[in-house]
Image (cartoon, rainbow, N blue to C red):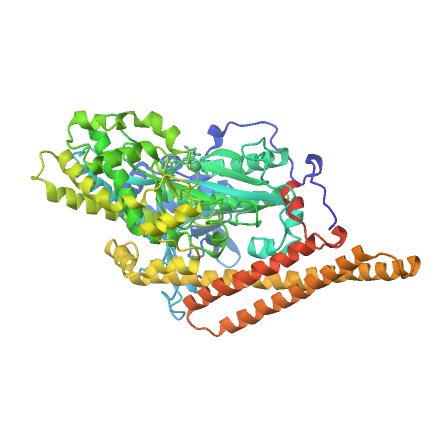
Amino acid sequence: MKKTCPIIAAERSYKIEKEKFIPVSEYYGEDTFNIKVMKLKLPGDTYKKIIDAYHEGTILDITTANIVAHAMKEWAIEKGATHFAHWFQPMTGITAEKHDAFIDLVGVSDVLERFSGKQLVQGEPDASSFPSGGIRATFEARGYTAWDMSSPAFIRRNGISTTLCIPTAFISYNGEALDKKTPLLRSNRVVSRSALNMMNLLGNTAVKGVYATLGPEQEYFLIDADYFYKRQDLVLGGRTVVGAPPAKGQELEDQYFGSIKERIASYMHDMEEELFKLGVPAKTRHNEVAPSQYELAPVFEEANLAIDHNQIVMDTMQLVAKKHKLACLLHEKPFAGINGSGKHLNWSMSDNKGNNLLNPGQTPQDNIQFLVFLIAVTRAVYKHADILRASVGSYANDHRLGANEAPPAIISVFLGDQLTKILEDIESGKITKATDREIINLGISSLPIVSKDNTDRNRTSPFAFTGNKFEFRAVGSAQSISFPATVLNTIVAESLDYLAEKIKARCGKDTSINQCVLTVLKKELKEIKSVLFNGDNYTEEWEKEAARRGLPNDKTTPMAIKALVTKKALDLFEKYKVLSNVELRSRYLIRVEKYIKDLAIEVKCLNNIAMSQIIPAATSYQKVLSKAIIGAREALGKTADLSAQQELLKRVTELMNKIYGTNKDILDRVETVASVHDEQKKAEILCAEVKTKMNELRGYVDELEGLVDDELWPLPKFWEMLFIN
Ligand code: ADP
Ligand code: MG
């Protein structure tokens, strides 16, 4: 392959237009129709109505909606918008938008810009081409989008096109959720209610509301766009299906937190500027472990907003990359043998005064509350580790999970030594009295300072307590965090309710509410402690230990996602009205189908690459070698030692045969599986048989890559893609 020179600053297609630099605080959120803008643009009573509707979750009356729509349109047009779009999150995991121009015909030859309250509040996109997992029969293709007032409308700029995007939920005509936002919003309500009940029970009655908070750390790769477009596997599937690891990978550990290259820093600046305009609090950026891998972490926000913002982050990363002639790879494992990308989902709860409920407090009372919430989350993971695992299951994420760089499929909880010791003391009965003195003796009053330092060290845990929040690390980099968050909210709500019932049942039996709490926690800890693990999650010993403890360990997605349709899961989501049985089953089905489709796309890419790129390159090299052998023999005589060329030719030929044969074998197997009607079975067979064969084929291609003349090799190699930028 001809090497491409990295684009140097002067040659770049983009220009650094801003000569004057404006502080972020001056333009932060300028492209969002946020509370501040509404206050400015709306009449006082309309503004009040919209704030009330938002807080009380009520529907806006049409007159108010008309006033808001008008102000929003005027604002958007000032920003250059010609169209509006209901922006939603179908079950594909990405976002969808259908643009409508603001124009309305006046007479026959004139138009006016118009946008009504009805258009703002509700849309009717044709739902038939979105996955519904069987919810919506094709004859009833209609679905509707409903404005989500809790997430501000925003301006989407793409090239010279400018669109007003209105965050919406996407629902079928029977009210079933066709998207990821609806169940998330339901789960937010559920966890708020349960948390508030618990706080009230514990005597904290001053609190009026609780909400879940999320901070998703987004990992990604950047490579030169020129290489990207030379690889159909990257363009079509997001991952290289062939390619040998480079001579230098990440072993020198010189990339993590290393100084950021100029081209990348410019990209980050540009990308973050877009995010700031959209009110996304992009806070931290750094080089990640693998070459050409980076991370962006935002300041945490209320869950629904954080999720919308993460979708915007993923979109913006890719859009801005194009401008810089880069390609942003969000795939969980773009390069075999090189660390993959995850998305650490930091999760906690805040009360309406902004107090973090997973922050150990200063007073014994705070600490009791902290312990209850900590144990409720731990119990939730213990009870529903299988559902959490299923929530992050995908064909792509399987390449990463458990590959000695990412948490294993076993979902355990890391609490750190200090907290573990406290829980052990409670469980063993060392702490018997819930007097202030003893609670202080628990040692938690000194937690805030120590734990931050202490708990963050274990990077191998899939679910770690990191001082004041839990970090769910098994989420894939390309995945929407909506469903994992929905699951977390729901299972924590259930555990809070369960503990509340137990505590209430003890009322009257113990001397104080704190004593009731301690008695209940002591008993519960006995059961749930098997989910706690502070050691190295990457080791084989842990796998054996986890099996002894009876923790689930479903390594592949086809096995793991069955957890979504167990009676336990169906009952739980139905009970909390987060997902009806039909809705949950549909999500399961979509995942199975997506697994099969993702694998099928890779099989086709691999076939195309093997047959139309690799074999022809190998044939050319075979020709070169054969000619060389014949020529050298003529020139040097029969006795000449040509063993090097001969052995090379022999191995190249063998590998070509192996590639051809294995590829055919893969295609045959795929064809046989096509007749299996049960999708679950199909996915299982493809996973067990075809995936292994694809790896085998990759092995042959990668060996060939090291033998064939570099000039003849048709694909950009890992070292080029990962080190030239
Ligand atoms: P680290 O990088 O060591 O994991 P940070 O403190 O930098 O830890 O936080 C990482 C992510 O966690 C950030 O996105 C941050 O906003 C988020 N986070 C911090 N506190 C909370 C919280 N209470 N709820 C949800 N996310 C949080
Ligand atoms: Mg982190």
- 611 versus 261 height, above or below: below
Q: Quadrant of residue 606?
A: bottom right
Question: Is residue 152 in view from this perspective?
Answer: no
Question: Is residue 69 in view from this perspective?
Answer: yes
- 642 versus 495 height, above or below: below
Left or right of residue 672, residue 420 in this image? left
Residue ID at (57%, 48%): 337
Q: Quadrant of residue 17?
A: top right
Residue ID at (64%, 63%): 608
Left or right of residue 535, residue 572 in this image? left
Expressed as whole percent of the image width and height from the top left, the position of residue 173 reads 33, 62
Out of 635 and 128, give the one closest to the viewer.
635
Expressed as whole percent of the image width and height from the top left, the position of residue 146 reads 36, 53
Number of on-image labels:
0
Left or right of residue 444, residue 83 in this image? right
- Quadrant placement of the C terminus: top right
Residue ID at (58%, 38%): 251
Expressed as whole percent of the image width and height from the top left, the position of residue 127 reads 42, 62
Left or right of residue 195, residue 261 in this image? right
Out of 591 and 92, give the one closest to the viewer.
591
- 623 versus 323 height, above or below: below
